[in-house]
Amino acid sequence: MNNAGMKKFFYQASVFTGVCMIMMLQRAATKHILITDAAGKEIDRSFSEESFNLLISSEVSNGQSGKLTIPLPKSVSSDDIILEDRYIDHELLIYIDGREEGFYLDNAVLTDLDIIESAVCISENDSGSVCLDFKLDGLYANESSLTESSTIEVSFFKPYDKYDNIVVVDPVAHDTVVERNSADPLEKDIPLDVALLLKGEAEKADDRSTKFYYTRLSAGEVSPERVRELIDETEADIVLRIGTESYENHQDGVRSYYNGEFFLRGFNNAEFAGLMAASCATKAGADVVGVYETNDDILSYSQVPSARVSVGSLGGTQDQERLSDKSYKHKLAEGLYQGIMQGIEEIK
């Protein structure tokens, strides 16, 4: 081959190499590998720099059967792990502050459960911190433990198989913001504030026989369809909606609403609504304005003791002030918790 031919050959080889490198870099953003999942099926394990499908192995020992076992880097301790149960979305998120980048590219989670629809590892930073996102085929309660062999073991249960009493709490979202005379606009999501304080009361009591589920624990709304699904999935024993009144110049105090269509033997909706209003108002030092029948769609759907408690009026002179006071909202939450527990005693 003469000099001209050699130059042409090297030029073409260089171009070919450059094109290959560009293609490799483009494809590196999303790769696809066929793996075997817990059910023994081949699945497409796609991944990018930010996330990838976790390796799943169904080769579990006797002690691991019926559980989800997650390996951990040796440097991870219990202080580096946070579990977030997003039951409303049928998800379990496990945040691991690790220090071994790429650990879950090579280390499989172990399970022979068929309730896991997807398992994804999401990179939180460049040093190995990740979020493991498990999508489940329904709503499950779970218990987790950190083992001596550096794994997390998670067991799943249907709520009604695990708990004696189940309460669904629905903080009703409002769009109304009421202007106050001498301060900032009144915070509009009072029901969420009270629900979060109620959650704290329930957790402080540490009643392992009673489980509280909340339709939301952050800003935003949940559709009525999803609320009804949560009531069904949990097989709730009690349903409580928390709201406020938004009418101008409305009388200050606590109101309670119930569905009169279903007459529940022994402890009906009207009795439960009256109990909740009295307990909430007494604890907070407020007046009970009244207990009313309503056609509320969620209360009409529920066939267990259910009520909507309006904790105050955004247009009331006194309520405008005290609904901005966290200590007052805390008393409202304490009253709601006490009312719920009394209601549970009534339906036993």
Image (cartoon, grey):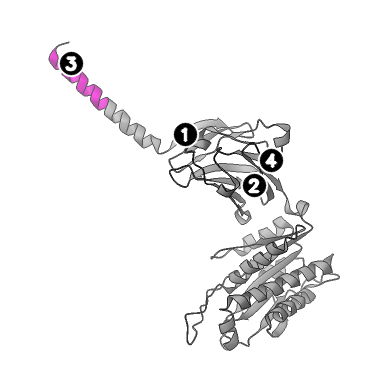
Q: Nearer the viewer, mark 1 or mark 4?
A: 4
Q: Which callout, 2 or 1, points at the residue further toward the start of the chain?
A: 1
Residue at the (65%, 77%) spot, across then down: 310
In the rendered image, residue 217 lying in the magenta stretch gets the answer no
Q: Which callout, 4 or 2, points at the residue further toward the start of the chain?
A: 4
User: Which residue carries the number 2 mark?
Assistant: 137
Classed neighbour count for the residue bearing mark 4: other residues with Cα under 10 Å, few (<14), some (14–19), many (≥20): some
User: Which residue carries the number 4 mark?
Assistant: 67
**Residue 341 vertical placement versus 287 (above, below):** above
**Residue type beneath disc 1:** His
Asked if the residues shown at circle 4 and circle 3 are in contact, with their CB atoms under 8 angstroms apart, the answer is: no
Any mark on residue 32, and which? 1
Work out whether residue 144 can be spotted. Answer: yes
Where disc 2 sits, the SS reads loop
**Which image quadrant for residue 213?**
bottom right
**Residue 132 vertical placement versus 45 (above, below):** below
Classed neighbour count for the residue bearing mark 1: other residues with Cα under 10 Å, few (<14), some (14–19), many (≥20): some
Where disc 1 sits, the SS reads strand
Front-most of residues 183 and 170: 183
Cα–Cα span, label 1 and label 3 = 38 Å
In the rendered image, residue 13 lying in the magenta stretch gets the answer yes
Estimate the x, y position of residue 347 in percent, counting from the top left.
83, 67
Residue range corresponding to the magenta coloring? 1-16
